[in-house]
Image (spheres, grey):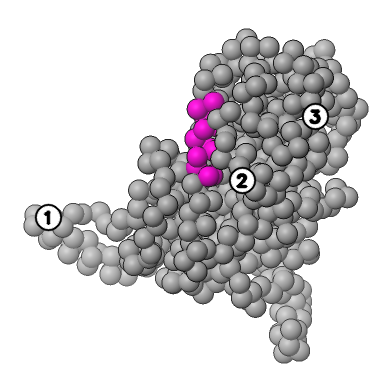
Amino acid sequence: MSNHINRQRRKIIKLAMFGGASTLLATQNKLNLIRAALASDYSAIDDYKSLVCIFQRGGNDAFNMLVPLKGSEYSNYQKIRQNLAIPRNSLLPVSGEQFGFHPSMPLSRALYNQGQLAVIANTGVLFRPTTLDSFRNNNLIPPDLFSHSHQMDIWQTGYPSDPSIIRPGWGGVIADKINQANSAKAGLPPTFTLSGTNLWQSGEITRQLGVSASGVNNFEFFSNDPWERSRTRAFERIMQMGSNHPLQAQMQQTLNDTRMRISELKKTLDQGAELTTPIDKKNPLARQLRMVAKLISVREQLGMKRQLFFVSAGSWDTHGDQVQDHADLLAMLDKGIGSFQNTMQELDSKGIVSTNSVSTFTASEFGRTLITNGNGTDHGWASYYMVSGGAVRGGRLYGQLPPMEIGGSNDAADEYEMPAGRLIPDFSVDQYGATLARWFGVSETDLLSIFPNLANFTQKDLGFIS
């Protein structure tokens, strides 16, 4: 970094610290300037990388997604899961046969065996390393455990849910910091969502741009029918008028900016390369991921060196009818991930983007209980996540499959807490996210500010990505 830049940063800090303003707003502005002055410089990034988050809304039953195959461990699993247990001869064993994937996941098993997919065991929302004793003593335990909305908030931000405070998501903060690497057309953000607004991509500066899986249409209020053209012209004149009212001016500017961004995005996508990898068009997750692939394919035309994508699928809250419903959901996930990785191979073969540049990871607000409630499972805590892509150190399980036992050393249930089989995580979401962010190019200093609980863990990189 040049001496001139260093001097300018020190000057900003001095002005911010000794400017003499007394209002709270002015103080906050100073703090923002200080953070900006001390922030890591990402402008020199010259390669391309993207992170793709697949959120399983509702809480995935990971204990049936991945099942131990060893004799005693499988027997314990079968005894605990009862009518939910997957028959051993139906499971899809991985190389080494220590465990098997659910029979609905042949593509994930293949990616694992090819070294392109890793499984991270026993991960969840944690503020610090937690044992059964610290859990029972309520020693910095995340609040509102087993609540969908609260745990989803903590998963995506790292902070307890608080209606009085709007917290940015860790994906959004990453985008805030690393967006200086981009030279995006029309001010397009580095964050795209295919599944509505989410906290994960909401930064202090950047806001995600929503895109439909079916394509990008012009952002217009009126059609091009003859009887609508006069209304369109009137609307255009209104949008060109100025306003002295700050809210009206802001809304007008926001609308104009959005129309410009959507128009530029649509034009660029229309000129992009055609993707020929087949997908199941009835699979909503596969369709979302296909649009992600299209956006990645035009990243050079858009001026992007770093991008973050969000896709999701619901209905993972399998309190009932789990055997069939969960099998269908896992098949959807498996085909979505499989077709997306094949599309990345297509882009690689065409010289558009390397498979090493795109990493996909799964997420869910929590896992589920080991025991059955009769026809399904209830809200749990620890879960397993999958990461896939060319840069992933795949073909490995990170961590250990938990003991298949009720009332063990990692079972958070007690005589006052039902149901049993809510397992305490070994790894935190902060560790999981920081490992991904480090690969993405985030500096060690910024990692500690992005992930508020990371400093509490000795192991800050889980090692599943190079």
Seen in the picture, residue 354 relative to 126 is either above or below; the reply is below
Quarter-of-image position of residue 149: top right
Q: Which of 107 and 381 is in front in this view?
A: 107
Is 336 included in the stretch rendered in magenta? Answer: yes
Choose between 454 and 26: the one closer to the eye: 454
Please name which of the two marks, 3 or 1, marks the residue nearer to the observer: 3
Name the quadrant of the C terminus.
bottom right
Residue indicated by mark 3: 402
Residue 358, percent from left and from top? 58, 58
- Asked whether 72 falls inside the magenta stretch, the response is no
- Callout 3 amino acid: Pro
Residue 368 — which label?
none
Magenta segment range? 327-338
Give x and y (percent) for residue 112.
66, 44
Q: Is residue 375 above or below residue 308?
A: above
> Residue at the location (60% across, 16% down)?
376
Residue 422 x/y as whole percent: 75, 24
- Give the foreground label among 2 and 3: 2
Mark 2, Cα crowd under 10 Å, few <14 / some 14-19 / many 20+, is some
Discs 3, 1 touching: Cβ within 8 Å = no
- Horizontally, residue 374 falls left or right of residue 192, namely right
Q: Residue 225 carries which label?
A: 1
Identified at 88% across, 25% down, the residue is 409
The outermost residue toward the left is 226
Q: Distance between the residues labelled 1 and 2?
A: 50 Å
Q: Is mark 3 on a helix, strand or loop?
A: loop
Q: Name the residue under label 2.
A: 111
